[in-house]
Image (spheres, rainbow, N blue to C red):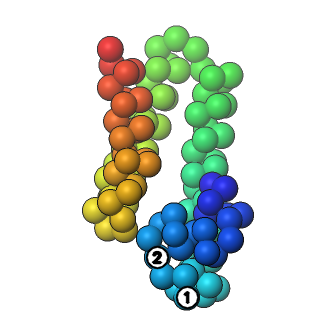
Amino acid sequence: MGLEMFASPATQAKSFGMPERFVHQPEAQTALKNQGIYNGMLGVLFLLSLVLFSGSAQVMVFRLLSAFVLVVGLYGGFTATKKIFLIQALPGLVTLVSLFI
């Protein structure tokens, strides 16, 4: 969320493997900020689920959110940059697997 919403265009370009001239465009900034708010709200959902749910319901919510992170990470890895496989898909996979152990 921090990179997508608050980082400088130069940092965003480097982090996401995009040309800096592209990242400076207002449309690209809008897209990055929309992606950032999605990531931030997903984090909020994880934290809220610690308070709102318990037991098997909490585990199920964590599984669903982790599966969501994994699927979105795989899509991003295939369509945007391979780094997303490591930054998003792998943590989603590790979390999901750990919730089934």
Report the residue at 51% width, 64% height from top. 15
Report the residue at 52% width, 69% height from top. 14
Of 18 and 36, the residue lying toward us: 18
The reply, left or right, for residue 84 in relation to residue 37 is: left
Q: Is residue 55 above or below residue 67?
A: above
Tell me where residue 26 appears, x and y as whole percent. Answer: 64, 85
The reply, left or right, for residue 47 in relation to residue 55 is: right
Tell me where residue 97 appears, x and y as whole percent. Answer: 32, 26
Tell me where residue 44 appears, x and y as whole percent. Answer: 65, 40
Of 38 and 98, the residue lying toward us: 98
Marks 1 and 2 sit apart, C-alpha to C-alpha, by: 8 Å
Q: Is residue 56 above or below residue 80?
A: above
Type of the residue with mark 2: Met
Element marked by disc 1: helix
Estimate how packed mark 2 is, as few (under 14), some (14 to 19) or many (20 or more) residues with alpha carbons within 10 Å.
some
Report the residue at 28% width, 62% height from top. 78
Element marked by disc 2: loop
Q: Which mark is residue 8?
A: none
Tell me where residue 53 appears, x and y as whole percent. Answer: 60, 20
Type of the residue with mark 1: Arg
Q: Quadrant of the N terminus?
A: bottom right
Q: Is residue 72 above or below residue 34?
A: above
**In the orientation shown, which residue stands out farthest toward the top?**
55
Report the residue at 55% width, 88% height from top. 21
The residue singled out by tag 2 in the image is: 18
Q: Quadrant of the C terminus?
A: top left
Q: Which mark is residue 21?
A: 1
Residue 34 visible in this rendered orientation of the protein: no
Q: Quadrant of residue 81?
A: bottom left
